[in-house]
Image (spheres, grey):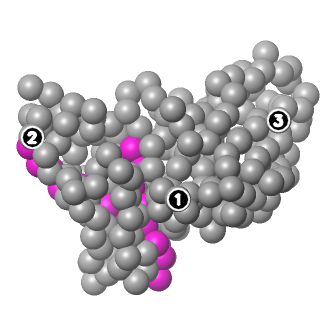
Amino acid sequence: QSVLTQPPSVSAAPGQKVSISCSGSSSNIGSRSVSWYHQLPGTAPKLLIYDNNKRPSGIPDRFSGSKSGTSATLGITGLQTGDEADYYCGTWDDSLNAGVFGGGTKLTVL
Amino acid sequence: EVQLLESGGGLVQPGGSLRLSCAASGFSFGGYAMTWVRQAPGKGLEWVSSVGSGGDTYYTDSVKGRFTISRDNSKNTLYLQMNSLRVEDTAVYHCAKGGIGEGGLYNWGQGTLVTVSS
């Protein structure tokens, strides 16, 4: 059971928008920055969003992040088949004094 | 260009030891926190351990007392000494630049596979 809760799967059609939620608590998301990662099959994870809503260079603005209270959300617009991947949220947990990830969300672009 | 290259994985019996290495290049290694993340076959990401630029260390509960993270800034290399290995430690181990909190895990290595089996 992951400390951060994500839906196991989401799906949408090409060109549409999807949101992936990440729910935590006051000891993690409520007090720390959230980052988001995607992992294409057979590859290493890649940073998509850091510090809740910032994009590393090279990440298109189709990807966005937000945080409210103890939850965070990754938004993806203009879905492409190449966006099919597993998506993970992560942050620090002050109670555990350790990093934590969500269980991951598999995105299917129908 | 940032490069992270893990090595040291392999097959080990339960109770055995392995030392993973992560050779870093393309950035000022000593100025960054570094992190180990693992992924068991068919499972999600699991944060394992991190070391700050000042040498402070952190571990997930399941590896405390068994794993030791360290860094050699003169060699631009991160290590993970893994002792008393268990079957459930079987995973691909990735090293990453940064910490999972502020700034995120900015760059990742391709990983090295650790298999614990008799």
Q: Residue B88's mark?
A: none
Q: Earlier in the sequence, mark 1 or mark 3?
A: 3
Q: CA distance from mark 2 to mark 1?
A: 30 Å
Q: Amino acid at mark 1?
A: Ser
Q: Which residue is under mark 2?
A: B15
Q: Are marks 3 and 2 in contact (CB under 8 Å)?
A: no
**Residue at coordinates 71% horizontally, 42% vertically from top-left?**
A23
Q: Amino acid at mark 2?
A: Gly
Q: CA distance from mark 3 to mark 2?
A: 43 Å
Q: Which residues are magenta?
A: B16-38
Asked whether, in this view, residue B87 is left or right of residue A24, the answer is left
Q: Nearer the viewer, residue A92 or B50?
A: A92
Few, some or many residues within 10 Å of mark 1 (<14, 14–19, 20+): few
| Chain for numbered disc 2 | B
Q: Does the stretch in magenta take in B64?
A: no
- Which of the two marks, 1 or 3, is nearer to us in this view? 1
The image shows residue B99, relative to residue B54, as above or below, that is above
Q: Does the stretch in magenta take in B27?
A: yes
| Chain for numbered disc 1 | A
Judged from the image, the secondary structure of the residue bearing numbered disc 2 is loop
**Residue at coordinates 51% horizontally, 67% vertically from top-left?**
B98
Q: Which residue is under mark 1?
A: A95
Q: Which residue is under mark 3?
A: A19
The image shows residue B66, relative to residue B99, as above or below, that is above
| Chain for numbered disc 3 | A
